[in-house]
Amino acid sequence: MSEERITRVTLEEARKMKGKTDWARVDALSDEDIERAVAEDPDAPPFWTDEDWANAQRVDPQKHTAVWLDRDIVDRFKEQGPHFQARINAALRAFLDARKRDAEETADKALPEASS
């Protein structure tokens, strides 16, 4: 964008400016009108279908915390591109899932077999 097209105003000046929105027209729109307009808007995100919801998975919220990692580990993940924290998280998740599977398999082997 060209600098000459930028108009700077103070907050006070901005509050005095008249908007161009036709609020009476917006207030008169029915839910069906709004849904049709959204459906026809190529920039609108798609609606979630029942199939989308059926395949959705719950994701636990993340907790931000400081973790001390060896420099070479962080460097190796950073070398693979952006979002290295997500890849570290995925690696830790895979490790924990594998440990859980191993523990479940060990517990299953320790159970006595049922006699017929």
Image: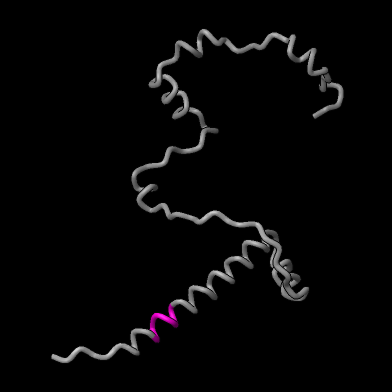
* In-image side of 67 versus 25 (left or right): right
**Residue 5 percent location from the top left of the image:** 82, 21
> Residue 79 falls in which quadrant of the image?
bottom right
At x 55%, y 11%, the residue is: 23
Q: Nearer the viewer, residue 77 or 1?
A: 77
* In-image side of 30 versus 86 (left or right): left
Q: Nearer the viewer, residue 115 or 72?
A: 115
**Residue 81 percent location from the top left of the image:** 70, 63
How many marks the image carries: the answer is 0
- Reply above or below: 106 against 31: below
* In-image side of 10 versus 48 (left or right): right
For the view shown, which residue lies furthest in the right direction?
4
**Residue 73 percent location from the top left of the image:** 72, 74
At x 34%, y 44%, the residue is: 50
Residue stretch rendered in magenta on the structure: 101-106
User: How does the figure colour the protein chain or chains?
Assistant: one colour
* In-image side of 105 versus 88 (left or right): left
Magenta stretch containing residue 102, yes or no?
A: yes
User: What is the quadrant of the C terminus in the image?
Assistant: bottom left
**Residue 74 percent location from the top left of the image:** 73, 70
User: What is the quadrant of the N terminus in the image?
Assistant: top right
> Residue 62 falls in which quadrant of the image?
bottom right
At x 41%, y 41%, the residue is: 48
